Amino acid sequence: MMLPFPAEEKESHPFLTGVQAGLSIAIGYLPVAFTYGLLAKSSGLSLVETVGMSMIVFAGASQYIALSMIGAGTGAFEIIITAFIMNIRHLLMSASLNERMSEDAKWIKAVYGFLITDETFSVAATRTEKKLRSAFMLGLGLIAYGSWVINSGVGFLIGSGLPETVQNGMAVALYAMFIGLLVPSAKKSRKVIALAGTAAFLNSLFSLYDPLSGGWGIILSTLLSAAAIEFFMTEENVYGE
Amino acid sequence: MESSLLWMIAGMGVVTYLPRVLPLVLINADRIPPRLQRILKNVPFAILGALIFPGILHINEDSMWFGLLGACVAGAAAYLNWNIILVVLSSVAALSLCSFFMN
């Protein structure tokens, strides 16, 4: 039978699917970006600098650390090096994502590559589709980016904090999202449990040793776990079946 | 805008962007040996473990039980196949309530 359209066209556009998938990130970023805006203001940054840093850097942890280093009077060079160490783990994510993405022009990859964060990567990489479309990644990244940039500005402008009880609760938001992404895959695959458990254990160990806390610890524990578990559980698959 | 701060932000932008984009544009996914491909496919799940622990234990300065409670609520909601947004909101709500009653 001839169909008027390929079956694929009936599904919603991958960009919209991406936006939908990114909603949880947008919510999770709200309190984090808001607090960043607040702290930036109290660190003496202007609105343009505050929002500009969110637009250009788009990396929560390094922006927070930059603020505290500015506060401590640290030089720009040290702050940049620290941001590099914090974010070198994106190399791993980018390489891993490269395996899942449909082939596309390099400039498009260079655009959605900018949008890789711990959160957008985790949402994309735990999708069950075999290949991910560039438009999906753009939709996912842009809603997360929008939330990050806008809420940085809102935090700066509103200035006073959320009620403390809500702030305390909101601190868990991104972690809850990581757990929400991990559990469905863990239910289907013992290998996923082993991977996450081993990396969590190693990172907890590394965090006790100061030079490895922060950026390097996450990279090392991820690499060691991904390689060791592959060695011990070669036969099993991370995507169930 | 203070110009040294501007340069700092630009520098942070560059060192953050490069690791994000270089593997995507430089690596030809088909040319990677299968064993390394499998290791790269393991990365998301390993990194999730490392991102969650031990960070979640430190979300509250006073007590690591706070984070553990949040983890349990999120884990239970996710285990019941709740939508990810509900997983996040239920965990936030539980800890907000908990914090409200502790004060």
Image: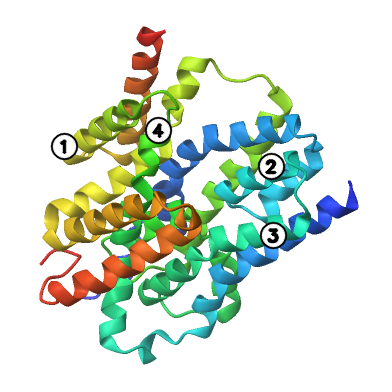
Residue A75 falls left or right of residue A124: right
Circle 2 SS class: helix
Read off the residue under disc 2.
A67
User: Image quarter for residue B101?
Assistant: top left
Host chain of mark 3? A
Q: Are marks 4 and 3 in contact (CB under 8 Å)?
A: no
Host chain of mark 1? B
Q: Position of residue A112 (x, y in %)?
A: 54, 65
Mark 1 and mark 3: span between their CA atoms? 43 Å
The amino acid at mark 4 is: Val
Residue A187 falls left or right of residue A139: left
Near mark 2 (Cα within 10 A), the count class, few <14, some 14-19 or many ≥20, is many
Mark 4 and mark 3: span between their CA atoms? 28 Å
Read off the residue under disc 1.
B80
Read off the residue under disc 3.
A80
The amino acid at mark 2 is: Leu
Task: Quarter of the image for the C terminus of chain A: give it.
Answer: bottom left
Work out whether disc 1 and disc 3 sit on a shared chain.
no
**Foreground residue, A3 or B70?**
B70
Residue located at (54% from left, 36% from top): A32
In this rendering, does residue A14 appear at all? no
Above or below, B6 against B98 in this view is below
The amino acid at mark 1 is: Leu
Mark 2 and mark 4: span between their CA atoms? 21 Å
Q: Which mark is residue A104?
A: none
Residue located at (54% from left, 80% from top): B25
In this rendering, does residue A165 appear at all? yes
Read off the residue under disc 4.
A172
Q: Position of residue B17 (x, y in %)?
A: 62, 66
